[in-house]
Amino acid sequence: MKKVAIVMGSDSDLGVMTATIDRLKSFGIPFEVRVISAHRTPAAAESFSKGAEKDGFGVIIAAAGKAAHLAGVLAANTIIPVIGVPIKSSTMDGLDSLLSTVQMPKGIPVATVAIDGADNAAILAAQMLALSDSALSEKLSVFKADMAAEVEAKDKKVSEMFK
Ligand code: RP5
């Protein structure tokens, strides 16, 4: 199976991105974690993204806050799909990160999840890799069925409360 790269702009993003790491582990997906900044280490951002395909990565998850250009810069240098996680790390509650990540120009898409949407980033990466991995596809089906069963149990409990 191809690996997922989890790249974050700062180690201060790690708390949020633990949810990505946990979810990828639960699906048995191999991953590597890096701290690379579009602004503070731009040469590393370029060389990492240019080499990502030959280094065995199938998806890049890029998390950054404030003027969050990391996902876009990585996407500019690779054809591997890039999932952006806008991090809520500033006084603007992450709206700055969201807009910086999602508002990409035509031709260079970044699949952007919600502010601090680290768990969904892992699930989306799994869905991408599952296109060519039937065992992973089965795990995702079980995951969705479990989630539906949880909601159904909550529905039963809450509806009983108001009968
Ligand atoms: C961004 O600036 C990082 O992704 C982080 O979310 C934010 C703050 O970084 P630090 O100043 O904590 O390193 O580049």
Image: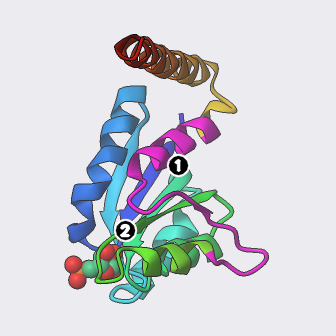
Locate residue 101: give its quadrant. Answer: bottom right
Depth order, front residue of 57/64:
64
Establish if 136 lies above or below 13: above
Q: Position of residue 34 (x, y in %)?
A: 32, 63
At horizontal 44% and vertical 16% (from top left) the residue drawn is 159
Kindly identify which numbered label has been placed on residue 56. 1
Depth order, front residue of 37/101:
101
Residue span colored magenta? 103-128
Q: Position of residue 120 (x, y in %)?
A: 48, 45
For marks 2 and 1, give the one nearer the viewer: 2
Mark earlier in primary sequence (2, 1): 1
- For disc 2, the marked residue is 87
Residue 160 lies left or right of residue 56; in this view the side is left
At horizontal 47% and vertical 57% (from top left) the residue drawn is 61
Q: Confirm or reject: label 2 Cβ below 8 Å from ligand 1.
A: yes
Residue 61 drawn in magenta: no
